[in-house]
Amino acid sequence: MNINLTGKGIYVALMALIPITCEAIAIALAALGVFGMPIEVGFSLGFAVAPVAAAIIVPQLMKWDSLGYGKSKGIASSLIASATLDNIACLIIYGIFKTIVFQNAAQIKGSTQEHKNPVWDIVLIFVHNLAGIIGGVIMGLLGYFFK
C-alpha cells in the first residue's frame, strides 16, 4: 500500500475526530439513560468502544486498495490513516476519562490517602504514549538494521 497524505492532513484529522466524538457522546448518553451510569463512566465506555469500527473497515479498505479502487485519489490510505489517528485519540481520551472516574471514586469513597492532582495523572498519559512511540521507533530501527 502506497500512502501519500500530502495536503490531506486536516481531512484525515476531521475524519478521525468527528466520528469518534459523535460515537462516544451517543454511547455516553445511552449509558447514562439506559444503565444510569455516571457521565464520566459513560464517556470512558464510549471511547473504549468507538475504535472498534476501524477494525471492521480497514481489512476491506486494504482489499480495495490492492484491487486499485480509489488509488488515484488515495481514498483507502486516507481512511486507514484516519482510523489510526482515531485509535490513538481514543486511547488518550479514554485514559483521561478513566483518570477522572478513579479520582471521583476515591473522593466519594473517602479514601484516607492524600488525593493526587488529576492533572499530573493526565500528563502521565501523554508521557506514556510518547515513551511508547519512542520505544516503537527504536524497535523498528533495530528490526530494520538487524534483519
Image: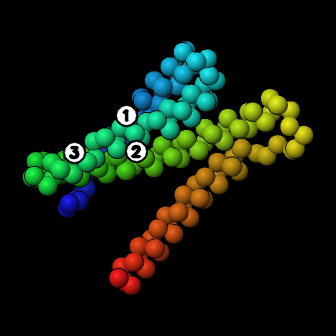
Q: Residues within 10 Å of mark 2 (few under 14, many from 20)?
A: many
Depth check, mark 3 against mark 1: the one in front is 3
Most distant residue in the top direction = 33
Q: Are marks 2 and 1 in contact (CB under 8 Å)?
A: yes
Going from the N terminus, do you reach mark 2 or mark 1 first?
1
Vertical position of residue 112 compared to residue 34: above or below:
below
SS label for mark 1: helix
Q: Which residue is mark 3?
A: 60
Q: Residues within 10 Å of mark 3 (few under 14, many from 20)?
A: few
Q: Give the Cα distance between marks 2 and 3.
A: 17 Å
Q: Residue at x 69, y 49 (%)?
A: 121
Q: Give the Cα distance between marks 3 and 1.
A: 19 Å
Q: Give, as a three-letter code, the residue at label 2.
A: Asp
Q: Which quadrant is home to the C terminus?
A: bottom left
How many dots with numbers?
3
Q: Give the Cα distance between marks 2 and 1.
A: 9 Å
* Relative image position of residue 9 (x, y in whole percent): 31, 51
Mark number displayed over residue 19 = 1
* Relative image position of residue 88 (x, y in whole percent): 45, 50
Most distant residue in the right direction = 112
Going from the N terminus, do you reach mark 2 or mark 3 first?
3
Q: Which quadrant is home to the N terminus?
A: bottom left
